[in-house]
Image (cartoon, helix red, strand yellow):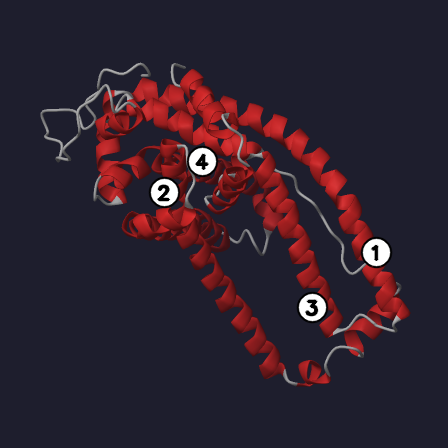
Amino acid sequence: MDAITPAFEHAKQQLFRPFRFGQWARLALVGILAGELGSAGGCNFNFSWPPPHHEHGSEHLLGVVWPPELARDTALVAGLIAFAVIAGFGLMVLLLYITSMMRFILFDSVIAKECHIRQGWARRKSPGFRLFVWQIWLMLATFAGLLVLIGIPAAVVWRMGGFTHPREHLVRLILGAALLLLLIFAFVLAMALVQVMTKDFVVPQMAFEEISAMEGWRRLWAALKQETGGYAGYIGMKIVLAIGAGIAFGILTFIVLFVLLIPIGGVGVAAVLAGKAAGWTWNFYTIALAVVAGCIALAILIFAASLISVPAFVFFPAYSIYFFAGRYPPLAAALWPQALTPFAPSSPTPESPPFPPPASPAR
């Protein structure tokens, strides 16, 4: 609780004293790429494009206007699918690396109350790459865990004939499915908790010391065993704050995006009518053009939502920073340099706690 008030004050000073739109926009971009948009709530929009048409139009779209080489050459279609899969995986890895780098840039921006993307990127290449490697291993561990949780029960059901004669094992299948869902939920929750505690408590250690994420977790685990109640209270309070922020920013975001959709939708309708007037039909190229235009519109809406959520982007990292500063001296020295002497990094000894608490106003 002691960390909430200074975190609010920190966010007000950084964002409104004075208000600078350039800083606000950079924080919005960093917040998106660091994966912080979910902390301020989100909205799901379902688009149906191109609009549904009658059956004859669908047959015309699928059978005539697509390039004929796609219909004749199955190897080409398979190659395009393989390329899309590989490109999607590569894009996911690239975004994971960018997210790892932006996590440190956001941390530095909150500490210094200034957001400088290029300087932060050049400064944080080494810890950003180490965090990226940790994220890759965590993602693989998550996939492997889900594969085991789903694969072993599926094999058991197959061995007992549950797939071929489900009515004979209906009760066991229902009870097993319920238990499996609980196990999957608990596993996903545990992985999410690891992710949250990594960005809140391991990233600061990696930022101040040349250590890996695994070493940061080793120190954090020792601290968790010594102060389980404090960290559990932090997680519980953060959930409560995230729910409140999600509701507040979600309502505000919905209103703003609804207003923005009016001119964007108007431009889209005008483009469709102009295309019909010019004799255009829905084919491979016009659909590709529509997809590109839709992606641009979606990017505008996401960035608008991020601009609205900037206060949450600053407050939640500040909350974790002020909580952790009372338990990690290098972070406390960065927040209150006048109250603490410079910290010399050293490995914790078994006889002493990994994060000796300094004298600080927030615990």
Q: Position of residue 177 (x, y in %)?
A: 53, 41
Q: Earlier in the sequence, mark 3 or mark 2?
A: 2
Alpha-carbon distance for marks 1 and 4? 43 Å
Alpha-carbon distance for marks 4 and 2? 24 Å
Q: Which residue is mark 2?
A: 104
The residue at the point 69 percent across, 68 percent down is 288
Whether residue 270 is visible to the viewer of this picture, yes or no, is yes
Q: Residues within 10 Å of mark 2 (few under 14, many from 20)?
A: many
Hey, what amino acid is under mark 2? Answer: Phe
Is residue 240 toward the left or the right of residue 207 in the image? right
Is residue 82 toward the left or the right of residue 355 in the image? right
- For label 2, the SS is helix
Q: Earlier in the sequence, mark 1 or mark 4?
A: 4
Alpha-carbon distance for marks 3 and 1? 17 Å
Q: Residues within 10 Å of mark 1 (few under 14, many from 20)?
A: few
Q: Which mark is residue 288?
A: 3
> Quadrant of the image for the C terminus?
top left
Q: Which residue is mark 1?
A: 269
The residue at the point 32 percent across, 33 percent down is 201
Eye-nearest disc, 3 or 2: 2
Is residue 186 toward the left or the right of residue 166 in the image? left
Hey, what amino acid is under mark 4? Answer: Leu
